Image (cartoon, helix red, strand yellow):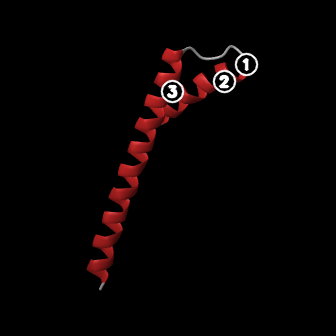
């Protein structure tokens, strides 16, 4: 996850420097963003399930 975010930052830094991004780089940025969002969603789902199990155990 951290590697994807660092890669996104590098691509966005290139964009900010005024060099622009090629269509391939834009597609790559979209892929890394999608993967990062999916990983975050899965982590949140796992945490939610874990909390539900813990709550059931306590009651």
Measured from the top left, where is residue 26 in percent x and y? 53, 22
Quarter assignment of residue 51: bottom left
Furthest-bottom residue in view? 59
Q: Quadrant of the N terminus?
A: top left
Is residue 12 visible to the viewer in this orientation of the structure? Answer: yes
The vertical placement of 36 against 27, above or below, is below
Rate crowding at label 2 as few (under 14), some (14 to 19) or many (20 or more) other CA atoms within 10 Å.
Answer: few
Contact, mark 1 vs mark 2 (Cβ under 8 Å): yes
Measured from the top left, where is residue 28 in percent x and y? 47, 23
Is residue 3 visible to the viewer in this orientation of the structure? Answer: no
Quarter assignment of residue 44: bottom left
At a point 62% along the width and 26% down the height, the residue shown is 12
The residue identified by callout 3 is 29
At a point 32% along the width and 71% down the height, the residue shown is 52
Residue at disc 2, secondary structure: helix
The residue identified by callout 2 is 13
Contact, mark 1 vs mark 3 (Cβ under 8 Å): no
Between 23 and 48, the one lying in front of the other is 23
Residue at disc 1, secondary structure: loop
- Lower sequence index among marks 2 and 3: 2
Residue at disc 3, secondary structure: helix
- Lower sequence index among marks 1 and 3: 1
Measured from the top left, where is residue 36 in percent x and y? 44, 39
The residue identified by callout 1 is 17
Rate crowding at label 3 as few (under 14), some (14 to 19) or many (20 or more) other CA atoms within 10 Å.
Answer: many
Q: CA distance from mark 1 to mark 3?
A: 16 Å
């Amino acid at each position: 996850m951290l590697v994807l975010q660092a890669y996104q930052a590098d691509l966005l830094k290139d964009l900010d420097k005024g060099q622009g991004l090629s269509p391939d780089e834009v597609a790559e940025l979209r892929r890394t963003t999608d993967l990062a969002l999916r990983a975050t969603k899965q982590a949140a789902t796992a945490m939610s399930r874990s909390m539900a199990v813990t709550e059931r155990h306590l009651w």
